[in-house]
Image (cartoon, helix red, strand yellow):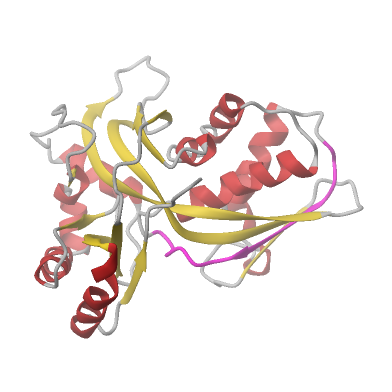
Amino acid sequence: MKITINAHAKINWNLQVLGDFPSGSGNEGYTRIESTLVLLDLFDAVTVQTLPRTNRALEILCDNPQVPQTSTGNAQANVCAKAVRALYEEYPDVPQNDLRITIKKHIPLSGGLGGSSTDGVAVIDALHQLWNLSLSKQDKINLASRFGSDTAFFASGYRCAQVTGRGNIPQKIVPFLADTSFVFVYPLKEVFVGDVYNSLRECDYEGCGTKRGQAVFANDLERAPYVRHIFPEREEICRVLRESGCSQAQMSGSGPTCFGVIEQRKARAVATRVKERFSKYDVFISNPLRGA
């Protein structure tokens, strides 16, 4: 048996860094944040197939060779594999079937849009259906939090949410971006989230602890020295997005994907102008997921 799940991307409409967790909190090494997350209509297609053998063997296939998978010998580094391990650890009585996971990748890799996390949660959703499990929404959120932080948002099923803690506590909010599209620029490089947070911590960012409200458009991670060093193009990309017609522009999450906010009817024309300026980058349009 097999099932395909659409694993949707997200943007961080805002991301506020509130400082490190105190010693003894159980979250040592993580950073406290508040962030407004918005689900997008951009998605990866994740197919999970249960096989007849019952050795709990796992095969991961992907059309992007940069994604950890069986053919490259590093499948266990894939978040999908971490999701399966978390499920087995939390619910050891689930079936023993071998599994084949096939990912058709559309979300930029390590781009700040949650591509790996949403794929992992899609695997949990697929196995929940294939094995007729009876997990509640909170069960899924708790399970997803074992193999990530923004994974909890994807597991919640919310189109729009305010997340707190290390990003693993989602609270549903009313979607607020009617008739809005986003123009994205992905500069074809990877930015690693751990390095972003570590460099921000080391620079003693003076804005840590400042709360600005869920609708404020801002991303504290843009201030990280690591981002400024490895991704100096960010300022120019955001400037070009604004000059091309976007009302606002910033990096999503830990980057490096940047996005501009535009009325839906104007998005195609703006994307064309942006692509003319950045012909070597991926430029694309996506919208907030509606009606989910």
Count of all numbered marks drawn on residues in the image = 0
Q: Main secondary structure of the magenta part?
A: loop
Q: Residue at x 69, y 30 (%)?
A: 89
Q: Quadrant of the N terminus?
A: bottom right
Above or below, 137 against 102 in this view is: above
Q: Is residue 176 on the magenta stretch?
A: no
Q: Residue at x 28, y 68 (%)?
A: 265
Q: Is residue 156 toward the left or the right of residue 57 in the image? A: left
Range of the magenta residues? 95-110
Q: Is residue 96 on the magenta stretch?
A: yes
Q: Residue at x 36, y 31 (%)?
A: 166
Q: Is residue 148 toward the left or the right of residue 270 in the image? A: right
Q: Is residue 200 toward the left or the right of residue 194 in the image? A: left
Between residues 22 and 15, which one lies in front from this camera angle?
Answer: 15
- Give the percent coordinates (x, y) of residue 111: 36, 60
Q: Residue at x 50, y 60 (%)?
A: 43
- Give the percent coordinates (x, y) of residue 211: 16, 28
Q: Quadrant of residue 185?
A: bottom left
User: Is residue 268 in sight in this rendering?
Assistant: yes
User: Is residue 29 in sight in this rendering?
Assistant: no
Between residues 251 and 42, which one lies in front from this camera angle?
Answer: 42
- Give the percent coordinates (x, y) of residue 187: 29, 71
Between residues 154 and 229, which one lies in front from this camera angle?
Answer: 154
Above or below, 64 against 90 in this view is: below
